[in-house]
Image (cartoon, grey):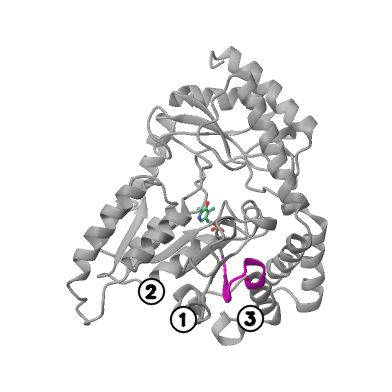
Amino acid sequence: MNDPLSPFYTVIETMKEKGLYNTIRTIESPQGAWLVINSTKVLNFCSNNYLGLASDKRLSNAAIQAVKKWGIGNGAVRAISGTNALHIKLEEKLAKFKKVESAIVLQSGYVANIVAIQTIMGKEDIVISDELNHASIIDAIRLAQISNKFIYKHNDMKELEMRLEEAKKLQKTPRSDGGKRLILIVTDGVFSMDGDIAPMDKIVALAKKYNAITMVDDAHGEGILGSHGRGIVDHFHLHGQVDIEVGTFSKAFGVIGGAIAGKRELIEYYRQKGRPFLFSTGLSIPATAAMIECVQVLTESDTLVKKVWNNAMYLKKGFQKLGFDTGRSETPITPVMIGDENKAKEFSAKLFEHKVYATPIKFPMVPLGKARIRVMPSAAHEKKDLDFGLKVFATVGKELGII
Ligand SMILES: *Cc1c(COP(=O)(O)O)cnc(C)c1O
């Protein structure tokens, strides 16, 4: 009999032939400055573990203690019998940390974006989105089936205002239910391919002018921007002025999960209506306990936040001294520009031969001809680790004629 799934197997074969097949490496060690891959120690320049918290003993111990006390399973979705005191404690602690009225904890950053957009936006509403926004925002917009979708050039406030003008015109026609069409401006806080920051102050000002809602996905800004890593809203002192703040626990916070922070009534609405909240079991007990500890650690001290920044500055200066171009980064995310797609791939492979693990970022993730190696420093790195990385980049850079 013919296998109806066979077209997919053919795709895999074609991907392998074209060199597009994604070989996923297996990590044989905890997350940290170094990783073990194929029984070999390699310098880790590609995790989002900015603060080194993914293997922090305080967080792991909190998780172990919680499992001993509470067991492992939540038992049900949060709306039935699966909301435990840990969830509530984390939501309260997180809201306090981020200086917002309220927060809702979800299963991941991806899910948080889905809840944030799909729950309040419908077909006839209007979304205005930065062209470089994360895939989970794009998926959330698709899931909400919003037909009035405007994309503006990356961080281009002139174009954003033009789109707002168009949106205002559209708004003159009410929705078929008689309601006024919502206008949502959505942006990443820190853009993960370039490490640049969204001009939230300007976005908020434009939103006020056009009576639009603002949403920021701060996956790469939390733990990095603002005092003690409170995120982009704190960085721009915009407390209470950004309607929807989405975050992830899987990057700087070192755990897993996601959250939406904002006004009490809006978060309440998400609790009542958010489908992934109602129909999918909530964050696990160990993850929730580890996150409570994480927020505590960050509230008490900004040592790790300072360290990742110091490391990033040291590394960027090092790259620039060697003659590399580190693009438009304003955060620890450090793109090392290569240009040609194949050269970036070769560069990364050679780095790996020299025991440095840093991934190439190529089209379609970035424009054609703008391929790069993305270097992710963390607070887990020491100067000697960074020096080792710089030395290897210098060797490979000369070998491939980049510097
Ligand atoms: C990683 C990331 C997400 C997804 O977060 P998860 O918690 O891993 O689901 C969402 N948005 C942005 C901008 C991200 O970088």
Highlighted magenta segment, given as a residue range: 95-107
Residue of label 2: 120
Residue of label 1: 269
Camera-side residue: 14 or 208?
208
Magenta stretch holds residue 77? no
Q: Residues within 10 Å of mark 3 (few under 14, many from 20)?
A: few
Q: Is mark 2 within 8 Å of ligand 1?
A: no
Residue of label 3: 75
Amino acid under disc 1: Tyr
Measure the C-alpha gap from mark 1 to mark 2: 9 Å
Residue 241 visible in the shown view: yes
Residue displayed at 42% across by 64% down: 214
Contact (CB < 8 A) between labels 1 and 2?
yes
Amino acid under disc 2: Ile
Label 3: which secondary element: loop
> Is 314 positioned to the left or the right of 17 in the image?
right
Whole-percent x, y for residue 267 in the image:
51, 77
Identify the mark nearer the N-term, 3 or 2: 3
Measure the C-alpha gap from mark 3 to mark 2: 28 Å
In the picture shown, does residue 181 fall above or below 19? below
Whole-percent x, y for residue 73 in the image:
67, 75
Whole-percent x, y for residue 189 in the image:
50, 53
Query: Quadrant location of residue 349?
Result: top right
The quadrant of the rendering that contains the C terminus is top right
